[in-house]
Image (cartoon, rainbow, N blue to C red):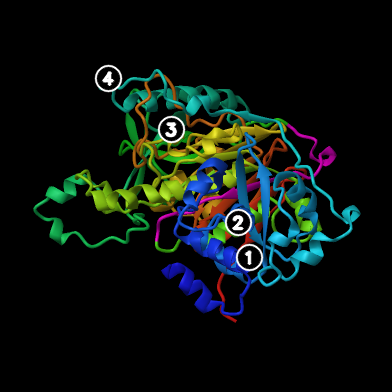
């Protein structure tokens, strides 16, 4: 009764029962949990408090928006609704976006919702009556393009691995063995007349080549032992974003020993622990190794693709949704969903949206307050705070997977294991979206193919860690370096947590991707890198959507990309 009085007070011009029913229905939706899938039988039980139940009221509820945050769009008459057939005839999927044209929905509304056009009062939708009467020939439905998808996450999955107290030395040995064999094959073309020796076999003054793993000794590197040091108060405060110091130096080690590297060729600020390289130099009288030249593995070989013969197909990348945080804007993401599903824009924009064949959500989709993750018992009143962000994410993903394939990757803030490789988010977290075969919960890192174009990416932990322990012009330079080092996470397990593999290093890059992306970055950056053997790689830094409102769109035809921006500020 209070709700009804409030609605009629705000809109006193509505006099007919039909108009009151529609307005009351929209207001009544605010009290309901926002849901995308509406089951028809329970619908009438939800509406029992409102009597009588008119057909106009039922149809209005079916066509009401999925998110109460978009209620002003509907009440102002600037919205449109669309019904889509789902898996069964008793289930209707609803989605909304701001638009003023309803004409192209005439056929769908006639087939799916058998309600007369009089169910839409002109006071709420002043343009709909005219649009529905548009010429049928002017309406056109666009068929979404498709791409052949192949998931290649098997090497990042942990199925039969069991932790039996093994140490991290195994993964370093596996990395060194693989990369050393590769570098040995490159040495004859690099320095054909020099011998290759181990560190223990070095002789003073004699030039040679050694291959090993770089260890970077850092003066400011955080250590757990510092917390128990009696002199910790004398240690100067360090900026949290970078730990590089002028006194840092490099050490090379293999199975036989280790040696300190000297010379002006190697700048310690440009390297991190875990890189395997070949060095040309000689041992000094102090027992150090004076470096004269260096050989990196370089960008790996790549499968060549005839991009010019392809047609326009698009992949959308989005990351850092941070649903549940104070800066998350549900309207902003809803506009993105409606745009890529073809519910926004004119006919040309809808035609382009029909060419979107895949969506990748690259980590940090939700943000749960850290106080609830401290390990203490959660109070009943905090249960909803813990689960609501995941429920809302499922609601939004439900709209996407009903239209196109979606890959979702875990990030550092998501409910997944912390160490890399992060395993797929459990499908039980998404009861709505996981019902579709277009929903794919993936690992982090994530590797896949679309129409034979190889994609490789992470949620950003590898590049964020490189930014802490080394220096570069921008994040794109770090991406290019990891390709030349042929390792996705060179600082694992030193400063990035990872699983202690015993017989392999899953982060080695053996085949060069055509698209290399990282999520949760501060800003959008991209470049096209060409290797010495005509490798062509599109590097992409995906910005945090909750902070920038930007998603990234990649064209599979020519690997060109641009941003989709959805500002929602009302400032003029």
Are circles 1 and 4 on residues that touch, CB within 8 Å?
A: no
Marks 3 and 4: which is nearer the front?
Answer: 3
Marks 2 and 3: which is nearer the front?
Answer: 2
Q: CA distance from mark 2 to mark 3?
A: 49 Å
Q: Label 4's element?
A: loop
Q: Which residues are magenta?
A: 304-325
N-terminal label among 3 and 4: 4
N-terminal label among 1 and 4: 1
N-terminal label among 2 and 3: 2
Q: Which of 413 and 353 lies nearest the eye of the viewer?
A: 353
Q: CA distance from mark 2 to mark 4?
A: 66 Å
Q: CA distance from mark 2 to mark 1?
A: 8 Å
Q: Left or right: where does residue 138 sit relative to residue 390?
A: right
Q: Which of 408 and 448 lies nearest the eye of the viewer?
A: 408
- Mark identifier at residue 54: 2
Quarter of the image that includes the C terminus: bottom right
In x, y percent, where is residue 553?
A: 67, 51
481, above or below 159, in the image: below
In x, y percent, where is residue 114?
A: 72, 48
Marks 1 and 4: which is nearer the front?
Answer: 1
Assess disc 2: are there few (<14), some (14-19) or many (≥20) residues with their C-alpha within 10 Å of its C-alpha.
some
């Amino acid at each position: 009764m209070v709700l009804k009085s409030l609605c009629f007070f705000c809109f006193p011009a509505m006099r007919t029962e039909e108009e009151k029913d529609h307005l009351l229905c929209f207001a009544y939706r605010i009290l309901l949990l926002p849901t995308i899938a509406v089951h028809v039988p329970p619908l009438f039980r939800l509406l029992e408090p409102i009597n009588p139940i008119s057909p106009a009221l039922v149809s209005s509820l079916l066509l009401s928006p999925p998110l109460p945050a978009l209620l002003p769009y509907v009440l102002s008459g600037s919205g449109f609704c669309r019904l889509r057939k789902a898996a069964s005839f008793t289930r209707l999927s609803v989605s909304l976006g701001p638009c003023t044209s309803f004409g192209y929905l005439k056929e769908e509304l006639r087939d799916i919702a058998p309600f007369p056009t009089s169910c839409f009062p002109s006071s709420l939708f002043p343009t709909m009556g005219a649009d529905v009467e548009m010429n049928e020939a002017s309406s056109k439905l666009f068929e979404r393009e498709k791409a052949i998808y192949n998931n290649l996450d098997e090497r990042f999955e942990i199925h039969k691995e069991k932790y039996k107290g093994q140490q991290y030395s195994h993964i370093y040995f596996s990395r060194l063995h693989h990369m050393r064999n590769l570098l040995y094959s490159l040495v004859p073309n690099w320095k054909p007349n020099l011998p290759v020796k181990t560190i223990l076999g070095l002789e003073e003054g004699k030039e040679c080549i050694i291959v090993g793993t770089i260890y970077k000794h850092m003066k400011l590197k955080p250590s757990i032992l510092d917390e128990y040091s009696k002199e910790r108060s004398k240690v100067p405060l360090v900026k949290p974003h970078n730990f590089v110091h002028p006194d840092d130096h490099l050490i090379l080690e293999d199975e036989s020993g280790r040696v300190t590297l000297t010379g002006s060729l190697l700048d310690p600020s440009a390297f991190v622990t875990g890189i395997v390289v070949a060095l040309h130099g000689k041992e000094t009288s102090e027992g150090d190794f004076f470096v004269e030249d260096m050989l990196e593995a370089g960008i790996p070989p790549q499968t060549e693709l005839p991009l010019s013969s392809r047609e326009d197909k698009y992949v959308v990348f989005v990351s850092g949704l941070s649903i549940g945080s104070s800066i998350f804007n549900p309207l902003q993401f809803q506009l993105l969903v409606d745009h890529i599903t073809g519910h926004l824009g004119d006919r040309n924009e809808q035609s382009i949206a029909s060419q979107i064949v895949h969506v990748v959500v690259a980590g940090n989709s939700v943000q749960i307050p850290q106080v609830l993750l401290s390990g203490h018992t959660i109070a009943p009143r905090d249960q909803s705070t813990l689960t609501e962000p995941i429920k809302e994410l499922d609601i939004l993903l439900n709209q996407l997977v009903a239209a196109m394939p979606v890959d979702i990757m875990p990030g550092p803030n998501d409910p997944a294991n912390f160490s890399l490789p992060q395993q797929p988010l459990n499908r039980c977290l998404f009861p709505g979206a996981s019902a579709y075969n277009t929903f794919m919960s993936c690992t982090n890192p994530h590797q896949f193919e679309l129409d034979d174009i190889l994609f490789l990416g992470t949620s950003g932990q590898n590049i964020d860690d490189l930014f802490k322990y080394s220096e570069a012009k921008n994040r794109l330079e770090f991406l290019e370096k990891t390709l030349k080092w042929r390792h996705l996470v060179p600082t694992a397990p030193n400063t990035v947590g990872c699983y202690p593999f015993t017989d392999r290093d899953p982060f080695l890059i053996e085949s060069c991707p055509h698209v290399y992306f990282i999520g949760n970055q501060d800003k959008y950056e991209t470049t096209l890198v060409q290797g010495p053997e005509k490798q062509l790689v599109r590097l992409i830094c995906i910005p945090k959507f909750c902070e920038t409102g930007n998603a990234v769109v990649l064209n599979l035809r020519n690997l060109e990309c641009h941003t989709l921006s959805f500002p929602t500020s009302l400032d003029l």
